[in-house]
Amino acid sequence: MSKKASTENVIPHAHVVKRAARIGTELANIRLSGDLPDETVAAINNILLERKVLFFRDQEHLDDGELERFALRFGELVAHPTLGATQGTASTLELDSTLVGSRVDVWHSDSTFVDAYPKITILRCLVIPPFGGDTVWSNTAAAYVELPPPLQRLADELWSVHTNDTSTRPTASEADKKYHEELLTRTVFETEHPVVRVHPETSERALVLGHYVRHFIGVPKCDGQKLLDIFQSNITAPENTVRWKWREGDVAVWDNRATQHYALNDYGNLHRVVRRVTVAGDRPVGIDGRCSVTRIKATKQPSARVT
């Protein structure tokens, strides 16, 4: 029996609703919990690998503990590398729009500034404004496939350095600078990743880029920025994306190895709260078999300042 047929035996076809052609599926009539049958978890994972991001409505019954129990069905939990986790949890991180640093309106994959960044991210919506606050995801495997062959060959050979120290980029306020200095970069990472990773479960090739890229190795900065713009424009092309309009109680699950995402900051001073759980991943492997490696992991002294 094929994987697709076995999945349909567990989750009826009528409950699997595509939300865009290349990425994004809503799974209806599933009550998420840590006690889901093994075959249901396997079916969810199969669909996730194919569709990259899954959406579940009406999950108001979940609390932090139960969401983490569900996440554990996909692997070991991991906290944010510098922000840690909410007290009493293994991985939960709250993003409250009233707090500095919680509006992540840049295209990124989670925590690519470390080598083994998360393989899966799960987001639960607690408070949503009456308008705005959508999230957009892109399929970085589809973006690679859509590159012209000469650009594919170039990407195959390139490596880039990712870092959480983005202090040289414009910041909105002194509060943002303080957040960046005292929390986000209390430990500074610089990690070398292949621009194209081979997905460990599907063998697809996916682009590893986004907000945390500092430069391409062996490429002058000016030329590298132009290359990054070209690759990112393919990743964020509308046909490679899906946009989700949140309702309170929604849960999104995405394959962080084959996606980027962007949280729209279009709701002014209104309140938005989501909580995130991440499942540990492994080090990306390039098409030449080499693995990502963290070259710098430096913890700052309390008095240090980012310059």
Image (tube, helix red, strand yellow):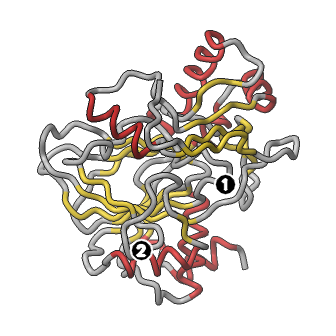
Query: What's the amino acid at mark 1?
Result: Ala
- Rendered location of residue 25, percent (x, y): 45, 59
For label 2, the SS is loop
Which residue occupies 40% across, 66% down?
92
Q: Which circle, 2 or 1, is nearer the viewer?
A: 2
Query: For numbered disc 1, what is the local secondary structure?
Result: loop
Q: Is residue 8 above or below residue 207?
A: below
Q: Which residue is mark 1?
A: 116
The answer to which image quadrant residue 47 occupies is: bottom right
Query: Circle 2 sits on which residue?
Result: 89
Of 106 and 37, the residue lying toward us: 106
Label 1 Cα neighbours within 10 Å, binned few <14 / some 14-19 / many ≥20 = some
* Residue 104 x, y percent position in the rendering: 36, 41
**Residue 38 appears left or right of 19:** right
Q: Residue at x 64, y 24 (%)?
A: 215
* Residue drawn at (69%, 24%) of the image: 216
**Residue type, numbered disc 2:** Thr
Local crowd size for mark 2, using a 10 Å CA cut-off: few (<14), some (14–19), many (≥20): some
Instruction: Work out how far the residue at label 2 is from the one at label 1, CA to CA, in angstroms.
Output: 21 Å
Q: Which mark is residue 152?
A: none
